[in-house]
Amino acid sequence: MICKWDSVDFECLKRSLLNVLESIDFNQKWFKIALGFVGFNPVFWNVVARLEYGTRFLTRLAGGARQGCYLLALTIFSLGVARDLCFEWSLRSQPVSAVLNQELVKNVGRVCIGVGQLLVVTSMYQLGITGTYLGDYFGILMDNIVTAFPFNVSNNPMYHGSTLSFLGYSLLQGKPAGLVITLFVHTMYSLALKFEEPFTAKIYAQRDAQRAKKD
């Protein structure tokens, strides 16, 4: 059943949403693997970064803080590529929903992908590799808080941009399974921020306190 987007029929909307959920193959192998990567990746980089902060094991292993950060960056990037590939492979075998397979939805998906990629690319440009990939846990701190775009529209443009990209691709493909994975991506990023933001604030507060003592 396809509802008209120019009018609100809540009963039709309810039936459409049920049809969307029923069309998802939750037992598909790549769907499960994609969810596994989505859940594992932020847990991995938070655990490893905390261990690095407390023990400097990556700094010693790589022969320096910057080299250690690059090693972690390469690992996180590789895990992200594996996650994205599994996400794409999962959607290939998932059914298309008639509710989502409409030009308006596809156009929304294209906009989401465009905005999402813009946030990701400009965030990395502003922060650089060490700023993007947890360099502060290695003692590589930025002199000042970045306030230029995209940080003037989002506190966490990398996470928001990534989530929008997942959402946009799912809408463009018309695959409800992608929306479920996107929701899980958003949930995991939100949980990760609850650990990352206070700890990062603590690191910079300690740096500022040490500077104040020297002055």
Image: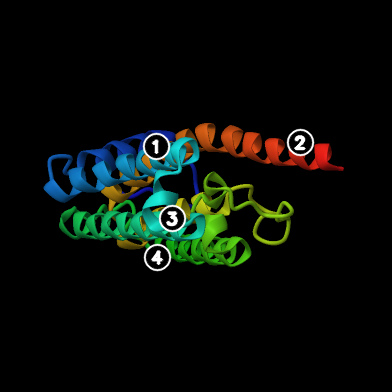
Circles 1, 3 touching at the beta carbon (< 8 Å): no
Where is residue 29? Give x, y as percent.
12, 47
Q: Which amino acid does label 4 sit on?
A: Glu
* Secondary structure type for disc 2: helix
Q: Which amino acid does label 3 sit on?
A: Gly
Which of disc 1 and disc 4 is earlier in sequence? 1
Q: What residue type is labelled 2?
A: Ala
Quarter of the picture holding the C terminus: top right
Where is residue 70? Give x, y as percent.
44, 60
Few, some or many residues within 10 Å of mark 3 (<14, 14–19, 20+)? many
Label 3, label 4: how far apart the Cα atoms are: 46 Å
Q: Find residue 209 and name its label.
A: 2
- Residue at 82 percent across and 37 percent down: it is 213
Q: In which quarter of the image is residue 202?
A: top right
Q: Mark 4 points at which residue?
A: 103
Circles 4, 2 touching at the beta carbon (< 8 Å): no
* Secondary structure type for disc 3: helix
Q: Name the residue under label 1.
A: 47
Few, some or many residues within 10 Å of mark 4 (<14, 14–19, 20+)? few
Query: In the image, is 154 to the left or to the right of 30?
Result: right
